[in-house]
Structures are given as structure tokens and as C-alpha cells.
Amino acid sequence: MSFFKLILSIFLIFNILGCVEKTTYSGKIITSEDLSNLKISNKDELMQKFGQPSYIDNIQNKFFYYTEMVKSKNFFNQKVEYSYLFVFEIDEFNKIIGTESINLLEKDNNIYQKQETNNNIIKKGFLEKVFGGVGPNKLPNSP
């Protein structure tokens, strides 16, 4: 009879815990109110309003802010409410020259998923791919 009570209590615990809805945020919490009153013209105002970016591209001088909200009732029932990437392009005088918001849930409109980096291994020969180069390696001159 105690085995039956144990199974019943485990079943009830999973049902009770499965009914609680949980909201999880990832990245920066950026609300629609923050974006509607967006009167930012330079890098200092951007950092003051949104804080440190999620990623900084130093080559193209772009700041990336990522935000996502997931609602879950249990392990099997999770739904992504929104997932956005905000890109701010900054010139050499710290002025914002371009902004872009990307909905990551719409994969057709996401231009960043279609970009690829160059693969230098393809340009090398077969021996260089297998052995990593041909010829003697130079020894370092450190004592």
C-alpha cells in the first residue's frame, strides 16, 4: 500500500508543479515603452539607457542588444513569446548612424543567418588539410 501512496504523491507533485506558469527573460530586458521613446543620438546616451550591450562588433563598430521572453508551464510546454536583436551602428565620432531591430522568430527576415564566413581550409591543398602544412617547423628563440 505504501508503494501506491508513493506513486500517487509523485503524480500529484508533478501535476501541481506543472500548473505554475513561469516567465524567463534572457539578455537585456527592453520593453516596448523603451523603444517607443527612443531619442538617442550618441553612444553615451545608448549606454546610459540600455546599459552594456550583449555583443560589440569592433570591426564594423556595431552594438548588439539581445532580448527574449519565454513562458513555460512545465518542461514539455515552453513557448517563446518574443526574441529580438537590436543593432546600433556607431560612427567614429560616437554618433548613432543606423539602427535595426530583428525579430529572431521570423527566420525568413533574418539576414544575419544567411551570412557565412570564409573557410580558409578549402583553399589549402590535401596534404595541408591532413598534416597542417609541409616542411620543418621553426623553433622559437626563447631561452
Image (cartoon, rainbow, N blue to C red):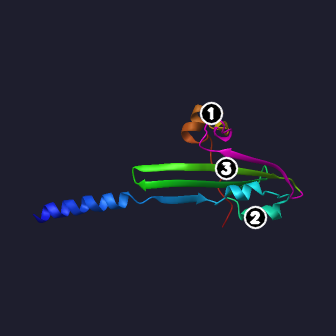
Q: Position of residue 26 (x, y in %)?
A: 58, 58
Image side of residue 21 versus residue 131, left or right:
left
The structure residue drawn at horizontal position 37% and vertical position 57%, both measured from the top left corner, is 18
**Visible in this render: residue 57?**
no
Q: In this view of the protein, which residue sits in the foreground, 14 or 111?
A: 14
Q: Position of residue 52 (x, y in %)?
A: 71, 64
**Which amino acid type is shown beneath numbered disc 3?**
Leu
Q: Earlier in the sequence, mark 3 or mark 2?
A: 2
Give the secondary structure at mark 2: helix
The structure residue drawn at horizontal position 57% and vertical position 35%, both measured from the top left corner, is 127
Q: CA distance from mark 1 to mark 2?
A: 44 Å
Density class for disc 1 (Cα within 10 Å; few <14, some 14-19, many ≥20) is: few
User: In the image, which is nearer the foreground, mark 1 or mark 2?
Assistant: 2
Verify whether residue 22 appears in magenta: no
The structure residue drawn at horizontal position 66% and vertical position 39%, both measured from the top left corner, is 110
**Which amino acid type is shown beneath numbered disc 2?**
Lys
Image side of residue 90 versus residue 10, left or right:
right
143 is higher (above) or lower (below) than 73: below
Q: Position of residue 135 (x, y in %)?
A: 63, 42
Q: In this view of the protein, which residue sits in the foreground, 103 or 88?
A: 103
Q: Which residue is mark 2?
A: 49
Q: Which residue is mark 3?
A: 85
Q: Earlier in the sequence, mark 1 or mark 2?
A: 2
Give the secondary structure at mark 1: loop
**Which amino acid type is shown beneath numbered disc 1?**
Ile
User: In the image, which is nearer the foreground, mark 3 or mark 2?
Assistant: 2
Density class for disc 3 (Cα within 10 Å; few <14, some 14-19, many ≥20) is: some
Q: CA distance from mark 3 to mark 1?
A: 32 Å
Q: Which residue is mark 1?
A: 122
Q: Which residues are magenta?
A: 93-113
Query: Which quadrant is home to the C terminus?
Result: bottom right
